[in-house]
Image (tube, rainbow, N blue to C red):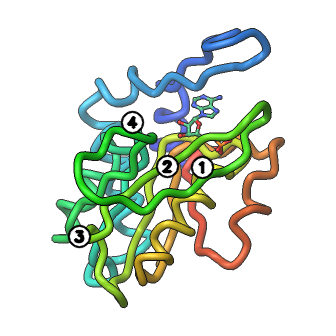
Amino acid sequence: MSDTIERVKSLIRDIPDFPQPGIVFKDITPLLADEDAFSSVIDLIVVHYGRGNIDKVVGIEARGFILASPVAYHFGAGFVPVRKAGKLPWKTEREEYALEYGTAVLEVHTDAIRPGERVLIVDDVLATGGTAAATARLVERLGGKVTGISCLVELEFLKGRVNLAGYDFFSLISY
Ligand code: AMP
């Protein structure tokens, strides 16, 4: 593991039993607060996909917004928020997906992505992959092409990648 990745990993904090018993929450706030580590993770995502290859960067509410915005800036791309149901003010496309218990809904503005645009999806943590897969379906419903899906952290033992077969998935840190 490179020194940079090792340092980034040391700045991700495990919070047992948050937000509910049995979940180990990966708290990235110490990483975000570190000026070197924050800029390094953004640079690594940008380098992986390459400048000139992305038209829109989609951030998934809420921690995905924090990472997707600087990535979009570096690409000279637009930023698009994908949000939980009822948060976006204008016309939306919606996608319902299964959680361990029950379902969740994600939404995007119908005019956020134009047909044919190359889209990178960014979030903080890939767990089961349900959130990222639902976001990819939303992008495709608007006619966008999912060029990649990137997460800072991948919880490998949950095998979320299986839900993202066929996409260029890139994570910086695995557990
Ligand atoms: P999933 O749809 O199961 O891949 O869950 C991914 C979404 O839930 C992401 O938006 C994450 O921010 C959040 N998430 C899931 N598990 C964790 C975890 N252990 N720590 C932090 N965030 C998590």
**Residue behind label 1 places its C-beta within 8 angstroms of ligand 1:** yes
Using residue 156 as the reference point, say whether residue 87 is left or right of it.
Answer: left
Residue drawn 55% across the image and 33% down it: 9
Kind of residue at badge 4 = Ala
Front tag of 3 and 4: 4
* Sequence-wise first label, 4 or 1: 4
- Image position, residue 113 (x, y; %): 30, 74
Residue drawn 42% across the image and 74% down it: 49
The residue tagged 4 is 62
The answer to whether the residue labelled 3 contacts the one labelled 2, judged by CB atoms less than 8 Å apart, is: no
The residue tagged 3 is 75
- Image position, residue 104 (x, y; %): 61, 41
Helix, strand or loop at mark 3: helix
Kind of residue at badge 1 = Thr
The front one of 115 and 90 is 90
The residue tagged 2 is 106
Task: Write down the quadrant of residue 26 in the picture.
Answer: top right
CA neighbours of label 2 inside 10 A, class few (<14), some (14 to 19), many (20+): many
The front one of 30 and 165 is 165
Residue drawn 51% across the image and 58% down it: 150
The answer to whether the residue labelled 1 contacts the one labelled 2, judged by CB atoms less than 8 Å apart, is: yes
Q: Is residue 175 visible?
A: no
